[in-house]
Image (cartoon, helix red, strand yellow):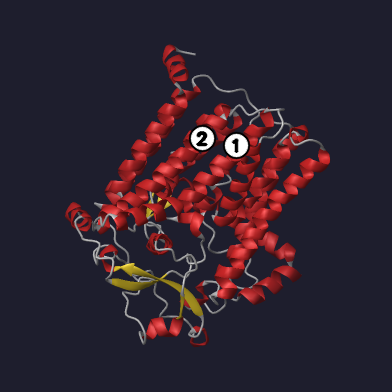
Amino acid sequence: MNSLERRIEHFGAEKIFIALFVLFGVMTLFMRPPYQLMDEINHLPRAWQISEGIFLSPTITIGDFVNGADVRSKKIFNLNQAPADALNDKVYFAEMPVSFLPDDFIVNANYKHYIHAFSIEGIEKFLATPLNAEKCEPVLIPNTGFYPLPTYLPQAATAFIGRSLNLNAGAIFYLMGLSGLIFVAACVFGAMKFLPEAKTLIFLLAMMPMFLVEATSTSADAVTFGVCFLGTAWLLSLRNSTEKFSRAEIFGLIILAIMLACSKSVYGTILLLYFLIPRERVGGLKKFLSLGAAILFLNLSILFVWSYLSADVTGAAPYTNYYLGYTDRNISAQKIFVTEHPAAFIAAVINSLIELKFIYLTNFIGSWGFLWNVNLPMIFCVLYGITLIFFGLTNGLRLTLAERAVLLFAAALSTIAFFLFDYLTWSAVGEDWIAGVQGRYFIPIAPMILGALSILPPMRNKHLIALAAGISSGVMMLSANFFAFY
């Protein structure tokens, strides 16, 4: 170990790591133009809606929206190609201040996008635009209206404060992104403190361009990434004690179960890491299993109750690309197919992983823009992916074979869950591959997958190597934004 490495360890590597994460995050926030992230134009209205105390998103029939009989809108989310039999279906919408929707920044989801077309003057104008919260337009949010309050907690709280202070629209927009970054940074820092042996791996995952751009947005992924990283690290750290469970730890399990249910429910499998905790900490096998079952039951109960409220009570139809004119999509028929042919579904998952592996890799490391039109060089994605695997192999976690199996099992369940969801909603009935799955879906479970790989001793000078790799990734992120948008 050289002297610089010793200084880093003595000072606290996690402090340097999180400072770099925040630095590159802030630069990413202000360099990436507004709404140049997949679905951000639908996440922001939902966060704003929650900030107004509207927790159950209202609905509107597709026909009314398309025909403009009852509303006028820029139709940011275009459903003009919806089949005739879908015009009476209900989808979520939000009332959004017009000041948040300047023509220079708004795109049509189906027909065009902006790239190489932004100017500093346009952003300065946005920052100077008065909020004028009373002048609103309806915006369709069919794919985000079902998210509950905790999913957008930092951004919604910031929107509430900004509206109360009557800040300009652009200022509120960037502060909402900044609040997401601060929340995620706190979670990442906490994860590194809970798992100091794996802090270099956690840092390198957080410095991925895809992680950075989502963390600095109003997207639900900001809270999801943060909660999953912190929850995974905390549960793994609970293995290292033999003291009886405290009330604070039980309360923490309850909060984690709630947050996982309210962010993206497919990652609730992280709660299975509870079963890695020594049973004597709870007071015997029966109490241990009872508490674990109660936590899982709480998570699933919240999921089912919210699904009932957001779908059955509101009458909103599950959003699929059937409403974009893909008439071979049918959730009911696909459910029947999966039930009758489970092997065919598993084969479709495997086929997708094999055939689309490089697409998943590029989207996992970094592919963003409104239509994924900002991509990093493939060589960078491959090299950074290899770096992550190497740090996974040497991450320092001391795991038994059974513990590795639990980690990989939980990650596999989440993978099957989001593949199944997209198979039902985005794929043709009986299709032999699965549409809609994005590489960034693997980010929340990456700590479990890579953490389970630890079979080699920690490398020498790991902090210096991690710093070099992380800074390189941050520079690549900023460069891609600059050359793509300006």
Residue underneath mark 1: 234
Q: Is residue 468 left or right of residue 300?
A: left
Can residue 433 be seen at all in this image of the molecule?
A: no
Q: Which residue is mark 2?
A: 190
Of the pair 21 and 437, the residue shown nearer to us: 21
Marks 2/1 in contact by CB < 8 Å: the verdict is yes
Residue found at x 69% / y 35%: 245
Q: Could you say which quadrant of the image residue 67 lies in?
A: bottom left
Q: Horizontal and vertical percent for residue 247?
A: 65, 38
Residue density around tag 1, few if under 14, some if 14–19, many if 20 or more, within 10 Å? many
In three-dimensional space, the C-alpha distance between marks 2 and 1, rounded to whole angstroms, equals 8 Å
- Looking at the rendered structure, which numbered label has been put on residue 157? none
Image coordinates for residue 144, horizontal then vertical, percent = 47, 64
Q: Amino acid at mark 1?
A: Trp
Identify the residue at image location x=46%, y=38%.
186
Q: Nearer the viewer, residue 466 or 297?
A: 297
- Amino acid, disc 2: Gly
* Residue beneath the point at 28% across and 66% down: 133
| Residue 480, above or below 198 | below
* 170 to the left or right of 471: left
In the picture, measured across the screen, residue 256 lies left or right of residue 100, that is: right
Label 1 element class:
helix
What is the total number of numbered labels drawn onto the structure image?
2
Residue in view at x 50 percent, y 24 percent: 462
Q: Position of residue 219 (x, y in %)?
A: 43, 55
Query: Can residue 48 be seen in this snapshot?
Result: yes
